[in-house]
Image (cartoon, coloured by chain):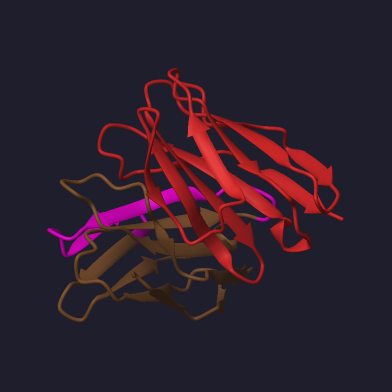
Chain colours: A brown, B red
Amino acid sequence: GENVEQHPSTLSVQEGDSAVIKCTYSDSASNYFPWYKQELGKRPQLIIDIRSNVGEKKDQRIAVTLNKTAKHFSLHITETQPEDSAVYFCAASIGYGGSQGNLIFGKGTKLSVKP
Amino acid sequence: KAGVTQTPRYLIKTRGQQVTLSCSPISGHRSVSWYQQTPGQGLQFLFEYFSETQRNKGNFPGRFSGRQFSNSRSEMNVSTLELGDSALYLCASSGLTRDEQYFGPGTRLTVT
């Protein structure tokens, strides 16, 4: 089955710096890759996602890139702020015509942004 | 539009008991997925229901079961509870594409 590896497990950056989190997946049939942010004691929140027919997607300070050949995708956060501090999860799923309810998650990256 | 709701939010049970958790999806969403979150194993997929049918199942023992009702609300049941079942149980709902999943606040289950 699908396996998702996420690195690093912890990441500490200074406010204003960029942060990059990387994930690799094993099943080349995966075609949907969301990123979730989970603050302490709260639910995971979808922050950005990308489908396999797109190489890059950007939303303000957040961007995701996908390399299907290498089977990896990355989250980029620019101009980090203290409120970006959280655990970030990547995930992958195989969509049958764009529909699948089975997300395989990475182990998470704890991002700390120091003021 | 109201978000995904889960009840109860906290639950304490003893080994051997059973428990039922409830999830109400976002209005109009017909797919509900369940996940178990623990510090050691992270987020793991349990099962997905779509239009009252179980469409996918994760690698969990048969003690974990679920169902979905005609109004898309879903329940999951864990029988013969074990200490290792202590976890945050999250449900997520999604709409027609069933890709973008929105999580509820979770039910924190503690088994003593």
The quadrant holding residue A62 is: bottom left
At 55% from the left and 76% from the top, the residue drawn is A13
The x and y percentages for residue B58 are 45, 57
Residue B54 is inside the magenta segment: no
Closest to the observer: B39 or A9? B39
Residue A49 is inside the magenta segment: yes
At 41% from the left and 64% from the top, the residue drawn is A90
The x and y percentages for residue B37 are 61, 58
Q: Which residues are magenta?
A: A40-62
Q: Is residue B85 left or right of residue A22?
A: right
Specify the quadrant that holds the C terminus of chain B: bottom right
At 37% from the left and 21% from the top, the residue drawn is B28
Depicted A95 relative to depicted A6: above or below: above
The x and y percentages for residue B95 are 33, 32
At 43% from the left and 19% from the top, the residue drawn is B70
The quadrant holding residue A3 is: bottom left
Q: Is residue A59 visible?
A: no
The x and y percentages for residue A14 are 56, 75
Q: Is residue A75 left or right of residue B65?
A: left
Q: Is residue B33 visible?
A: yes
Q: Is residue A8 left or right of residue B101?
A: right
